[in-house]
Amino acid sequence: MKISKIIPYIYTLSILFSQDIFLELTNLDSTDGNYNIQVQMASTVDIAGFQFQATGGILSDGSGGLASSNLSTVTTNANGMVLAFDFMGNYIPAGDGILISLTYSELTSSEICIDNPIFTSLSSEEYITDSGTCFSTGQEEASPSVNILEPQEGSTMYSNYINVSLLTIDPNNVGYHYHLDLNGENIGMFWIRNDI
């Protein structure tokens, strides 16, 4: 009976200590209309490059930290992709610290998360990475609704135009956008801008 109680603890400890890299989101602050958050890292291995998806808003920059100090190329896009590497063989040495600081121009979710992290060695081997928990932004999730005024539901379209009304109050003054799919194919996007 005692062995059956010890086995789950040993299994849990083995999982915790099998991670090569631990990530944690910390220190969310707002400056000049932007939102900045740090990605902290604890690593037992040298890192030649990494990529991950940063969710929760419109990403405008990723800079600083161990990534900028050690790798020649650090790039991001508005969809949240973060990519860092070096063509000259430089790497981030094993250790702890701020991996990178991320800047969002807008927050669109109640949480910022790191999804699908891929960290590699100098020999291109993928490390086991724990992306940590999501960070609460304090923003409330709003549920926008769309009302298609024309054509009416079930009617046949005879033109290239759809009259749409966005029925939403935007509590964060972000401006919602919507993708229009027709028979499973994306045919356009529309949005409301609150800064006009």
Image: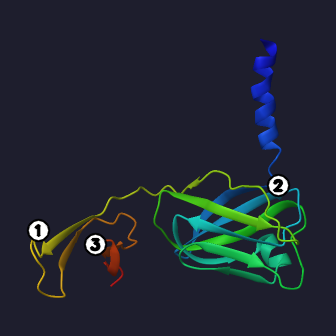
Figure check: 164 above or below 12: below
Instruction: Please say if the residues under marks 3 and 2 sit with CB atoms less than 8 Å apart.
Output: no
Locate residue 63, reporting x and y percent: 71, 77
Dot 3: element? loop
**Residue occupied by mark 1:** 154
Where in the figure is residue 48, as x and y percent of width and height?
84, 72
In the image, taking residue 176 as reference, residue 129 lies left or right, namely: right
Q: Which residue is mark 2?
A: 20
As rendered, which of 24 and 130 lies closer to the eye?
130
What residue do we see at 53% from left, 75% from top? 79
Look at the image and tell me whether residue 124 can be seen: yes
Q: Give SS at disc 2.
A: loop
Rendered location of residue 99, percent (x, y): 77, 67
Which residue is the site of mark 3?
183
Graded by Cα atoms within 10 Å as few (under 14), some (14 to 19) or many (20 or more), the crowding at tag 3 reads few
Q: Quadrant of the N terminus?
A: top right
> Under tag 1, what secondary structure?
loop
